[in-house]
Structures are given as structure tokens and as C-alpha cells.
Amino acid sequence: MKRIVVIGLGNFGAAVAETLYAGGQEVAALDADEKRVERIAPRVTLAAVGDGKDIKTLERIGAREADAAVVSMGDDIAESVLTALALRDIGVQEIYVKVVSDNHARVMEKIGVTETIFPEKESGMRLGRRVASRWLLNYVELTPGFSIQEMVVPLPWINRSLRQLELPKNYRVSVVAVHDVLTDRVSTIPDPDEPLRDSDTLLLAGKEADLAKIAEIK
């Protein structure tokens, strides 16, 4: 069990806090808005009203002993920056920050936070890729230039096997898993000779440019 502090309980922060708590983590949630704190209190370990920039407040909710912190301060960049600095001052090693712009992300990276998250931008990029491709279901960037995408089996691939398709050779991507949606069976080591069905989805990993070529298959 980890101790995680979540500061800022808007839609994003509250979702993170609830997910962590449901996954068995110890979660301390903090927000200046009493109504937000009251709403989340039954779904976290500790919920408190207070200022995330105040070190005494952070110590009161156990942030000094926390394994990680998540900062989600809405559009208030100054509050976000000062909260991250306060967490740094009390020794929190892992700090994840929701950002609202590229400049906000740059400031946070200069501070040395563990990771910046830009939910609106990331969601927009995923939706854009899904709309542009008839096969794409989901898309996650792991590192710059390298991603994982989930897609339905393109029509030209149905009833063909992975061995026949030779995806590593022909497209320079790897098959991470095959999911049969009808039976909900997931094969993390797919049978290379089993024909792909129209009920299958594929989880593929590779460079963005290579994955994009597959998404454009007619």
C-alpha cells in the first residue's frame, strides 16, 4: 500500500483519488472547497479542507510521509506551481501535476516534477486519431515517438494469421495482445497460426509513424 496525496478535487483530481483508493492505496485528499471535500470523503482515506501551498497543512494530512502526490489545481497555474514547490520542500519525491498549457508544463518540468499530465490535449489527440482511422479504438503514447494502439482487425487481415501477416517485418510493429471481444478472451502470447476474426481487437506497439501506416489501411 502506498500513501498518495491528491491536491485539488475537481473532476480530474477526484477521479484520480477515487481510483487510487479503490485500488487499495491510502489516499489523503485536499481542497480549499468544502463541498468538494465532503463529496469525496466517503471514497478516500482522509479528506481535508485546506491550502495546498501551506506546509503545515500538508504535514497535517501526512504529506511528509507520502510516497507520491498528485496536483490538480484547475486553471490556476500559480497555485499549481506553489503547491508543487511546497511538496518539494517537505521531501515528496514523486509529484504528478495536471497542466493546462504547454507553458505550464515547461514551468513544472523546470521545477523537476515527476510527470506532467495534459488531459484535454491527450484526449483530443486520441480522439483525433480515432476519428481519422476507421480501425483505431485507443491510442496511448508511452514515450515520445513510441506508442501502443488498440484497433479492430482491418478487413484485409480477417481470416489471416499473424504468421502470414508478418507485422514486425512488414510494418515494424509488435503484437502485444489479441482480445476476442465476444468471449472476452485476451491472448498475451497469441497463437501465430490462429486466423484473426472480425470479433478480435489487436494491441500493437511501435513507433508512431509505423502505427499510423496501419491505422490508414483501407
Image: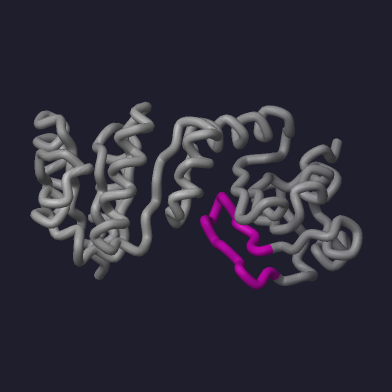
The residue drawn where x is 27% and y is 57% is 89
Name the foreground residue: 127 vs 183.
127
Residue 115 magenta-highlighted: no
* Residue at 10% over, 39% down: 49
- Magenta segment boundaries in residue numbering: 176-190
- Position in image of residue 179 (x %, y %): 60, 57
Q: Give the answer, above or below, for where 11 lies relative to 215.
A: above
Q: Position of residue 18 (x, y in %)?
A: 25, 47
In the figure, residue 69 lies in which quadrant?
bottom left
Quarter containing the N terminus? bottom left
* Rendered-image quadrant of the C terminus: top right
Q: Is residue 7 left or right of residue 181?
A: left
- The residue at 31%/60% (across/down) is 68
Residue 39 picture quarter: top left
Q: Nearer the viewer, residue 141 or 192?
A: 141
Q: How is the image coloured?
A: one colour
Q: Position of residue 27 (x, y in %)?
A: 20, 55
Q: Nearer the viewer, residue 186 or 104?
A: 104
- Please indicate, yes or no, whether residue 200 appears anywhere in the rendered image: no
Camera-nearest residue between 19 and 177: 19
From the viewer's perspective, is 74 left or right of 108? left
From what the image shows, is residue 112 above or below residue 78?
below
- Residue 140 is situated, as x and y percent measured from the top left of the image, at 60, 48
Q: Tag count in the figure?
A: 0
Taking the spot 21% from the left edge, 43% from the top edge, the residue there is: 52
Q: Is residue 94 visible?
A: yes
Magenta stretch contains residue 188: yes
